[in-house]
Image (cartoon, grey):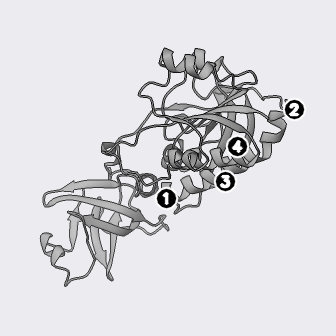
């Protein structure tokens, strides 16, 4: 029976750990993160799944701590897996398992190496993404590929919806390759790193909308940071508005000649920098939904049914 140490967090961590257990892998330790009280924990708990199966769990502040590395080495693992664990694992950990260290990444490598790959793929208007299981090197997301599973990104999919697809893609890819991986029948395929790019992390402030951008670009930002992520926003003299969902632009041209927020037939619209109109499905002000009707008291905040966004 193959022995594994698993570093995992988030939904991908939960589902991939479940795959290992379903295949009879002896998971001798799970290393995960303490939940941050300042973070919206909308995802499932790796620690809870491990507890269900009586697997010992560690929650270190530093996964590369020398005492922890020595403790894990004593477990003599065949494999080390990282499933959406947020810290980089250094050489002493990667050299530990007899049969290799593998990471599950949420993109079709070599594209979108690095942080928050689902969000970046949507921002760039990609029509597909997926999950990749690859060998772990000290250089992030650069090792040989052993399995991939693609999923579509539909024009109005939000990051949360795409992340659900990527979670399933990770489960499918691991489930398919794991028997051959355990038996040593897999030859990793080297990545052409020049064919992809590395992306850094994002923060809530990166959700600020620039209405001078084309409508398609604005739409991609809105859906890339839609809840459960912090949401896209813009500031007006009356306060900050959040745009939580929009529809892919349909080629309708605006009439204002500049970026403008307006109401028509009980719906919110924005004319963007390229003159194309974007329909806004959910607009929020001060934590309340801003309904596009004349009798909505919140609309009294705005002096006219249109607001210049220039």
Q: Is residue 303 above or below residue 187?
A: below
Q: Nearer the viewer, mark 1 or mark 4?
A: 4
Determine contact: label 4, label 2, CB under 8 Å. Answer: no
Per the model, the C-alpha gap separating discs 2 and 3 is 26 Å
Q: Nearer the viewer, mark 3 or mark 4?
A: 4
> How many numbered discs, if any?
4
Foreground: 157 or 229? Answer: 229
| Mark before the other along the chain sequence, 2 or 3 | 3
Q: Nearer the viewer, mark 2 or mark 1?
A: 2
Determine contact: label 1, label 3, CB under 8 Å. Answer: no
Per the model, the C-alpha gap separating discs 1 and 4 is 29 Å
Q: Is residue 68 above or below residue 57?
A: above
The residue drawn where x is 61% and y is 42% is: 107
Per the model, the C-alpha gap separating discs 3 and 4 is 22 Å
Q: What residue does disc 4 label? A: 20
Q: Is residue 242 above or below residue 41?
A: below
Residue 142 appears at what percent x and percent y? Answer: 64, 26
Q: Secondary structure at mark 2?
A: loop
**Left or right: where 7 falls relative to 270:** right
**Pointer 2 local density, CA inside 10 Å: few below 14, some 14–19, many at least 20:** few
Per the model, the C-alpha gap separating discs 2 and 1 is 37 Å
Tag of residue 158? 1
Query: Which residue ends up furthest to the front in the rendered image?
Result: 54
Q: Secondary structure at mark 4?
A: helix
């Amino acid at each position: 029976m193959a022995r594994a140490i698993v570093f995992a967090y988030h939904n991908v961590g939960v589902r991939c750990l479940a795959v290992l257990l379903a295949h009879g892998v002896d998971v001798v330790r799970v290393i995960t993160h303490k939940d941050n009280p300042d973070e919206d924990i909308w995802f499932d708990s790796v620690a809870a799944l491990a507890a269900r199966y009586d697997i010992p769990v560690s929650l270190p502040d530093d996964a590369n701590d020398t005492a922890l590395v020595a403790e894990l080495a004593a477990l003599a693992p065949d494999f080390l897996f990282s499933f959406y664990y947020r810290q980089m694992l250094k050489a002493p950990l990667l050299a530990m398992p007899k049969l290799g260290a593998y990471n599950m990444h949420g993109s079709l490598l070599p594209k979108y190496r690095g942080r928050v790959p689902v969000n970046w793929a949507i921002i760039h208007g990609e029509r597909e993404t997926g999950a990749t299981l690859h060998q772990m090197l000290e250089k992030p997301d650069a090792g040989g590929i052993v399995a991939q599973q693609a999923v579509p990104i539909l024009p109005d999919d939000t990051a949360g919806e795409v992340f659900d697809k990527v979670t399933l893609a990770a489960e499918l890819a691991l489930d398919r390759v794991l028997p051959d991986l355990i038996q040593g029948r897999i030859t990793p395929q080297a990545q052409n790193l020049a064919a992809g790019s590395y992306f850094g992390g994002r923060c809530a402030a990166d959700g600020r909308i620039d209405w001078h951008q084309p409508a398609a670009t604005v739409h991609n930002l809105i859906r890339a940071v839609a809840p459960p992520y912090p949401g896209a926003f813009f500031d007006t003299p009356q306060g900050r508005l959040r745009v939580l969902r929009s529809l892919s632009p349909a080629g309708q041209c605006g009439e204002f000649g500049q970026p403008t927020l307006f109401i028509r037939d009980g719906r919110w619209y924005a004319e963007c920098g390229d003159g194309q109109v974007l329909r806004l499905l959910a607009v929020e002000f001060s934590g309340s939904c801003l309904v596009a009707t004349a009798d909505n008291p919140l609309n009294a905040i705005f002096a006219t049914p249109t607001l210049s966004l220039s």
